[in-house]
Image: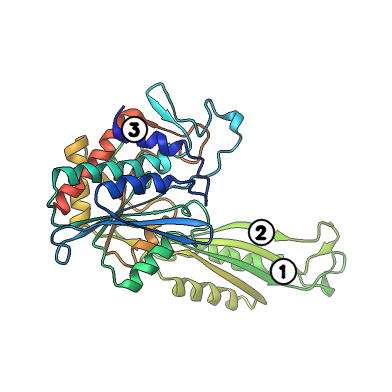
């Protein structure tokens, strides 16, 4: 068993359901301190975060490459539906099964072992290496990476490159990396009317009828055309609720939940203004409660994408596609203090599912890609 696989299995055996870390990071700290890292645990609420740094000989002038990830996992779902216990790492049919195998304990183990191997081979490395880990990525993400970023920002810490270990591959390891993510902006729209008896509509004002033309207009809007890296911004309704449950009552209000997944071609404020303009044009009496789930971020082609693509080609013989698809990630926080943030990890077909797994044949190559990136950027 390789050192990467052994550490992966050790981490999977910890039932670190968000926000519990269950000493996953303590295991990692012991390894990193032995490799010369300075490790700092940052606790916020019930979340455990780790910032670990190994400074190079040219720390002031050299580059700092950060590996970022999370030790928490999503709940297992019905345990009896799993072929093997979710927190008992099990090798079967050429795969490693267990909650977190793909998302993302194999990546975290790969970070650690790649760093150990790189430091052993390059004890006089010029650049610096860091790991940023949290136990609050799968949860609300309010006490995790964002808190570490705030602390680093307050200190004036400079981050040059960041590789996030999210499971980005699709059909095989290395076929896709994420060089950005769309933003998420949600709204809860309440349109007000006048409740009344359905047989006397002239004495009431039906908010469902009033809202329908405006919703139709919102659904037809072209918010932007996207750009080289992003598809066009999408506006979608997720829930509509109106009525008292009775069939003879015109409701007093209707509530519509909607969400934007938006690119860097639009801004939060611009999208809000355009929604309000459409609703106002229809003369609606309404309120909207807005929630910004995450701002979009983008890393154009540059040193990090070239190094990562080169490492994947050297190790796996394929050219990865750059993509910004998928949901939000902690990269949105790190991008505030780091100019180049790219995500790369194992295939994502089984993440959050029953019988989550990773191909055993991918474990060492994943670690090797991470090591090759270090060799290209901080040696």
Q: Residue 139 location in percent, x, y?
A: 52, 54
Q: Quadrant of residue 295?
A: bottom left
Distance between mark 3 and mark 1 Cα atoms: 58 Å
Q: Is residue 261 left or right of residue 323?
A: right
Q: Which residue is mark 1?
A: 207
Query: How far is disc 2 from disc 1 in space, using C-alphas?
Result: 12 Å
Residue 222 picture quarter: bottom left
- Which residue is at the front of the view, 27 or 190? 27
Q: Is residue 131 above or below residue 12?
A: below
For disc 2, the marked residue is 240
Q: Quadrant of the N terminus?
A: top left
Instruction: Mark 2 vs mark 3: give the one in front.
Output: 3
Q: Which mark is first along the chain, 3 or 2?
A: 3
Dot 1 surroundings within 10 Å: few (below 14), some, or many (20 or more)? many
Residue 288, given in percent of the width and then of the height, sits at 60, 72
- As helix, strand or loop, the secondary structure at mark 1 comes to helix
Q: Residues within 10 Å of mark 2 (few under 14, many from 20)?
A: some
Between disc 2 and disc 1, the foreground one is 2
Nearer the observer, 249 or 336: 336
The picture places residue 223, in percent across and down from the top left corner, at: 44, 66
Is the image coloured rainbow, by chain, by secondary structure, or in one colour? rainbow
- Residue 188 relative to residue 335: left or right: right
Is residue 289 something one can see in this rendering?
yes
Q: Which residue is mark 3?
A: 5
The secondary element bearing badge 3 is classed as helix
Q: Which label sits in the foreground, 3 or 1?
A: 3
Mark closest to the chain's N terminus, 2 or 1: 1
Q: Secondary structure at mark 2?
A: strand
Q: CA distance from mark 2 to mark 3?
A: 47 Å
The answer to whether 334 appears left or right of 57 in the picture is: right
């Amino acid at each position: 068993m390789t050192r990467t696989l052994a550490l992966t299995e050790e981490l999977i055996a910890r039932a670190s359901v968000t926000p519990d870390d269950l000493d996953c990071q303590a295991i990692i700290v012991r390894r990193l301190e032995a490799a010369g890292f300075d490790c700092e645990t940052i606790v916020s609420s019930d979340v455990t975060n780790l910032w670990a740094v190994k400074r190079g000989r040219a720390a002031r002038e050299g580059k700092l490459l950060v590996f970022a990830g999370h030790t928490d996992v999503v709940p297992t779902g019905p345990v009896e539906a799993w072929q093997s216990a979710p927190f008992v790492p099990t090798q079967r049919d050429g795969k490693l099964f267990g909650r977190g195998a793909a998302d993302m304990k194999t990546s975290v183990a790969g970070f650690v072992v790649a760093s150990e191997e790189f430091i052993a081979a390059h004890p006089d490395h010029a650049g610096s290496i860091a790991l940023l880990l949290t136990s609050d990525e799968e949860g609300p993400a309010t006490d995790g990476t964002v808190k570490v970023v705030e602390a680093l920002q307050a200190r004036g810490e400079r981050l040059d490159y960041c590789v996030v270990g999210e499971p980005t591959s699709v059909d095989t390891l290395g076929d896709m990396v994420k060089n950005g993510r769309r933003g998420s902006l949600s709204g809860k729209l309440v349109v007000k009317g006048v409740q009344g008896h359905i047989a006397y509509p002239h004495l009431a004002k039906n908010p469902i009828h009033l809202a329908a033309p405006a919703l139709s207009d919102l659904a037809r809007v072209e918010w932007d055309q996207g750009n080289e890296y992003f598809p066009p911004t999408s506006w979608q309704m997720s829930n509509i609720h109106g009525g008292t449950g009775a069939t003879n009552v015109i409701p007093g209000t209707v509530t519509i939940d909607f969400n934007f997944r938006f690119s860097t071609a639009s801004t939060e404020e611009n999208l809000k203004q355009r929604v309000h303009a459409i609703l106002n044009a229809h003369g609606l009496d309404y309120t909207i409660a807005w929630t910004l789930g995450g701002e979009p971020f983008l890393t154009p082609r540059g040193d990090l994408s070239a190094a990562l693509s080169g490492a994947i080609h050297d190790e796996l013989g394929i050219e990865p596609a750059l993509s910004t698809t998928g949901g939000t990630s902690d990269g949105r926080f790190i991008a505030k203090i780091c100019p180049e943030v790219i995500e790369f990890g194992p295939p994502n077909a089984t993440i959050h599912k029953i019988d989550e797994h990773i191909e055993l044949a991918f474990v060492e190559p994943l670690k090797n890609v991470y090591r090759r990136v270090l060799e290209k950027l901080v040696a």
